[in-house]
Image: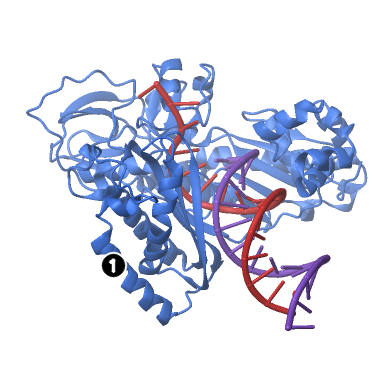
Chain colours: A blue, B red, C purple
Amino acid sequence: MEHVRSAPSILHVDLDAFYASVEQLHKPSLRGKPVIVGGVGVRGVVSTASYEARVFGVHSALATGIARRRAPNAAYLIPRFGAYQAYSEVVMGLMHDLSPLVEPLSLDEAFLDIAHLFEPEDVATPEAGSRRAREIAGELRDRIKAATGLTASVGAASSKLVAKIASDAEKPDGLVVVRPGAEQEWLDPLPVRALWGVGPATAERLRKIGATTVAELRTLSRQELVAVLGASYGASLYAIARGMDDRDVSPDRELKSVSVEDTFAEDLLDPATVAAEMDRLVNRLGSRLRKAGRSGRTISIKVRGHDFTTVSRSETAVGPTDDPVVIRAAAHRMLPGAVAAATQAVPGVRLLGVGVSSLAEWAQLDLFAEAEAEAEAEMLDEDDLDPRLWSDDGEGGEGSEEGEAHNAGDADDAHNAGDADGAAVAEELPLDPAHIATPVHTVEGERSPRQFGPLPPGTRGAVESARADRRFLPGQDVEHDEHGPGWVQGSGLGRVTVRFESPWSGPGRIKTLRAEDEALRLVDSAVVARDALERAAAREAPS
DNA sequence: TCTGGGGTCCTTGCTCTT
DNA sequence: TCTGAAGAGCAAGGACCC
């Protein structure tokens, strides 16, 4: 057994059911109840399920449709990234108080190097080291709980690999310290799936050669693993199975690529709509790149067909760009071929994506390429409405019945137009055609600046289209002049059901209001979260 | 009513350059 | 001048993570 450190001085901190836990904190009536955060649309998937919901067999990445069948009485909420970001910043801040070496993996997870907090006597024996690690980790957990109300599971070990697995071992609210020297003994009984990087495909291949546990994996030679998994992965799995991992905690990991994608509530069949959606994505990507101050040389697009056939195409330019005109021209050069390949068997585009990689920190001014791209973009403006361009064999188009969802003439509204209906805890609302949903204020700041971590599951499109349609989505924060703060429990035509309660109140009452009620407005979830966190800090301060 | 969105890393096959 | 080997760079796809 090899291990570089003599003390368990790497912590892996993981907030339990993070999104769902923040929702339960903010919505007192949901505490202790099954809560599912994710895409609420027809093609949504679960992002996070509270532990109460997991009892029903609901877990992340499960299709929301299946989740609704398994847990019909759970609350289904869209993610409020502004709020999660605010909580994440507080937790990351507490970790930085402890160590300058914090490596965030996502909003709710980070590695922490605490070696500098060990005195010589703490590393004299494995037992003393373990005691000290437990002490530090315990204190951090207490601080997180006091500052945010959230529970964190922490693993402490002599390597990142083992610390990560340890934090998962006693979730939720767990603290597992793996004594230096005992790593192998601790890893051996675990299923291979517990190892970082072993997913369903690898687990199946390993099963076929007789390894379902780490101990069994360790009986395989490096050559056998290389033969089955390839040189790089085979060798690294050979090392991982032996707990060999000397990676440092690295606080500044560089961003390698930026991309955006959307899955549509209904497949796109009309080439003009596909082109328009691609333009919309390119604009989104451009603004993300500019905000991040990055540009990239390689432009990639992704097309997923109705049958899930996924095709990607990429082009690498001489210099980096963040210019939507340049990106758009490249995307449109690749799009017809990619669409043809993805829809060969079954027509219909289910998902479109565009991204850049080979990032640089600035955009090289390439006037020549830009002029060329602009000229091409102009041509596309005229051409991309012609369905004949969309068939590789020139037979023309995949049909054009599609587009009912695209009636508004604004591509932004076109996707995920499906079911935005509410949390299952809401009462059934009578449909009243006289009360068509109308304008409420736009919500700002729902989208976090994402340097890392998961993104809104099948929801971004739904949120955007809801904003444009002035509809309410379950989970959104609202404020009413008369009734005060609350959140959307569900909505029907022209009506919205709100539960009036706040993170600092007791469980509140439900009221059904008219959607056009002037006194009702959406509130930025980040503001609500910061308010809740400040109140928690104020409560802590005197003691 | 099955399967989101943003990432990273790896493998394979191909082309180009030296 | 031709040819082959090796390596770099690119393109496409797959697996995995949260």
Counting from the top left corner in percent of width and height, residue A344 is at 43, 40
Give the side of residue C14 with respect to residue A509, left or right: right
**Residue A247 sits above or below residue A540 on the image:** below
The 10 Å Cα crowd at callout 1, few under 14, some 14 to 19, many 20 or more, is few
Counting from the top left corner in percent of width and height, residue C13 is at 57, 45
Counting from the top left corner in percent of width and height, residue A65 is at 41, 23
Which quadrant would the C terminus of chain A be assigned to in this image?
Answer: top right
Give the side of residue A350 with respect to residue B13, left or right: left
Count of residue discs: 1
Residue, disc 1:
A379
Q: Which amino acid does label 1 sit on?
A: Met
In front of the other: A535 or A422 = A422
**Residue A237 sits above or below residue B2 on the image:** below
**Residue A5 sits above or below residue A171 on the image:** below
Counting from the top left corner in percent of width and height, residue A348 is at 36, 38
Look at the image and tell me whether residue A18 can be seen.
yes
In front of the other: A248 or A97 = A248
Look at the image and tell me whether residue A443 can be seen.
no
In front of the other: A518 or A286 = A286
> Which residue is at 31% across, 25% downward?
A508
> Which residue is at 25% across, 38% downward?
A402
Q: Give the quarter of the image for residue C9.
A: bottom right
In front of the other: A529 or A20 = A20
Give the side of residue A511 with respect to residue A66, left or right: left
Which quadrant would the N terminus of chain A be assigned to in this image?
Answer: top right
> Which residue is at 67% across, 59% downward?
A100
> Which residue is at 23% across, 40% downward?
A403
Numbered disc 1: secondary structure = helix
Q: Mark 1 lies on which chain?
A: A
